[in-house]
Image (cartoon, rainbow, N blue to C red):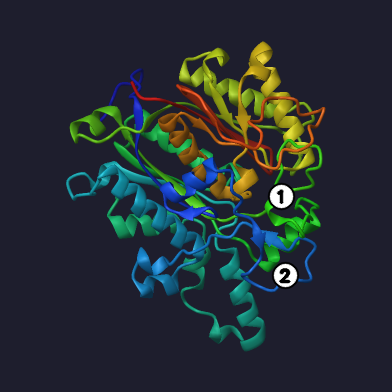
């Protein structure tokens, strides 16, 4: 089908799927988010005893064989396992079966930051220790970032747009935003979209430690991620995947789908400033939030809650606070802002996917997740961060922020469907 250049379709969320450090599935993860539980603990995937940071937010109790054949498990990197699992959950939640007559109108857009880094590390060791003939023919297909969207397409039969975005910590949000535009402009009727990441590996832990980006609170892992708080000292690497099924409103209504929420706006900007640091005033983030509001056709007065990027690094949190003040003016201190990274850690390219799911659940349940470990206020971060306990509030419109290395920014606005 095609639509006119001036017509924009409404885009709704009909399915959500989630694998996070707080649970396998949306219900378990959301229950623990609302309860303010931390998914952070000692690294168990390898011996991290010699590393400056020895803690991470690992996924627990996840068996990829529950979601795909064992042969596929052996041939795929963990970031693909997670994405496929979250997609299966999201499709089941949406009650959507991709049939031959609709397959070319169903697309996939996933985001990740580092792709199959663990696979690259493993086969580099094989090469050095055993020589080139021992490197698996599956190595390259396992490692490249588009294999999450590729295998989702293969497994579920989606033949529409098939894309991946690698924009660091903004990738999951960019993937959803770009998928939103493809549906809005009639390129696809349905998009499977979100983010996935699994890089709790020796090289990633070493690299982020070298950047001085990680918390060193190894003796209290559950208290290590403390966004916007005075004593924050860095982020915690997490892993997982969050996937949305989004559709044109007409398509969803025609098939009688349950509508969980609506995507109203999307912003994307660049800082043109520094490869890892945002500008001190958060100017790029502020423009991104303003762009999302303009795209949604609403004003800053209509946002009820912000799921912040909120990484728990000194610079990011203060810059995001300044950006919120720039955009929301006199309302800045009245809008609840929280960081679920205080509980999940930072999923890098997967962060925007799981945080989009949390935004949909916040709208549905009228609950704003807390920012846990908020003990000592920082004079430079002086907004309402929903400290330590979830808060009930009837929500209509919420914003989700993601900002990444390279100065890349992405913002989504979700609204309760009516």
Mark 1 and mark 2 residues within 8 Å of each other at the beta carbon: no
Residue 35 falls in which quadrant of the image? top right
Residue 6, horizontal then vertical, whole percent = 36, 17
Q: State which mark lies toward you, 1 or 2.
A: 1
The residue that appears at 65% across and 60% down in the rendered structure is 41
- Label for residue 145? none
The residue that appears at 38% across and 30% down in the rendered structure is 261
Mark 1 surroundings: few (<14), some (14-19) or many (≥20) residues within 10 A: some
Relative to 289, say whether 272 is above or below: below
Q: Is residue 279 left or right of residue 334?
A: right
Residue 161 falls in which quadrant of the image? top left
Relative to 345, say whether 321 is above or below: above
Decide which of 108, 321 is in the foreground and name it. 321
Decide which of 180, 353 is in the foreground and name it. 353
Quadrant for the C terminus in the image: top left
Q: Earlier in the sequence, mark 1 or mark 2?
A: 2
The residue that appears at 66% across and 33% down in the rendered structure is 387
- Does residue 353 appear in the picture of this structure? yes
Mark 2 surroundings: few (<14), some (14-19) or many (≥20) residues within 10 A: some
Instruction: Determine the residue located farthest toward the bottom in the rendered image.
Output: 130
- Does residue 163 appear in the picture of this structure? no
- Secondary-structure class at tag 2: loop
Decide which of 131, 226 is in the foreground and name it. 226
Which residue in the structure is indicated by mark 2? 48
- Secondary-structure class at tag 1: helix
Q: Is residue 384 left or right of residue 365?
A: right
Question: What's the distance in space between the residues labelled 1 and 2, CA to CA?
Answer: 19 Å
Residue 125, horizontal then vertical, whole percent = 65, 79
Residue 286, horizontal then vertical, whole percent = 66, 24
Which residue in the structure is indicated by mark 1? 223
Residue 379, horizontal then vertical, whole percent = 82, 27
Q: Is residue 294 left or right of residue 57?
A: left
């Amino acid at each position: 089908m095609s639509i006119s250049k001036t017509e924009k379709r409404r885009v709704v969320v009909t399915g959500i799927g989630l694998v996070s450090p707080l649970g396998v599935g949306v219900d378990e993860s959301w229950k623990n988010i609302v309860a303010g539980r931390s998914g952070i603990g000692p690294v168990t995937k390898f011996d991290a005893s010699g590393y400056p940071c020895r803690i991470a937010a690992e996924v627990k109790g996840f068996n990829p064989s529950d979601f795909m054949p064992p042969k596929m498990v052996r041939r795929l990197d963990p970031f693909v396992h997670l994405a496929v699992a979250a997609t299966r959950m999201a499709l089941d939640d949406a009650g959507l079966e991709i049939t031959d007559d609709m397959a070319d109108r169903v697309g996939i857009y996933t985001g990740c930051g580092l792709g199959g880094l663990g696979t690259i590390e493993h086969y580099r060791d094989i090469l050095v220790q055993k020589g080139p003939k021992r490197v698996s023919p599956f190595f390259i297909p396992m490692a490249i970032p588009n294999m999450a969207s590729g295998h989702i397409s293969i497994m579920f039969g989606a033949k529409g747009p098939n894309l991946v975005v690698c924009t660091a910590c903004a990738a999951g949000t960019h993937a959803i935003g770009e998928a939103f535009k493809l549906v809005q402009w009639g390129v696809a009727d349905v998009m499977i979209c979100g983010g996935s990441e699994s890089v709790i590996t020796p090289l990633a832990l070493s690299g982020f430690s070298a950047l001085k980006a990680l918390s060193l609170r190894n003796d209290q892992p559950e208290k290590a991620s403390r966004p916007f708080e005075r004593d924050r000292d860095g982020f915690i690497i997490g892993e997982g995947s969050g996937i949305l099924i989004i559709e044109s409103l007409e398509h969803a209504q025609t098939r009688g789908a349950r509508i969980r929420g609506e995507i109203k706006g999307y912003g994307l900007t660049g800082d043109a400033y520094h490869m890892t640091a945002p500008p001190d005033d958060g100017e790029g983030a502020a423009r991104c939030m303003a762009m999302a509001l303009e795209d949604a056709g609403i004003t800053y007065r209509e946002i009820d809650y912000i799921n912040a990027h909120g990484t728990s690094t000194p610079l990011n949190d203060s810059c995001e606070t300044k950006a919120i003040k720039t955009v929301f003016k006199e309302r800045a201190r009245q809008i609840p802002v929280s960081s679920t990274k205080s509980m999940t850690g930072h999923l890098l390219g997967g962060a925007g996917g799981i945080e989009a799911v949390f935004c949909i659940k916040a709208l549905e349940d009228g609950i704003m997740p807390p920012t846990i470990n908020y003990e000592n206020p920082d004079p430079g971060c002086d907004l309402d961060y929903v400290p330590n306990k979830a808060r009930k509030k009837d929500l209509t419109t919420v914003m989700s922020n993601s900002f990444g290395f390279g100065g890349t920014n992405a913002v989504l606005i979700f609204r309760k469907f009516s």
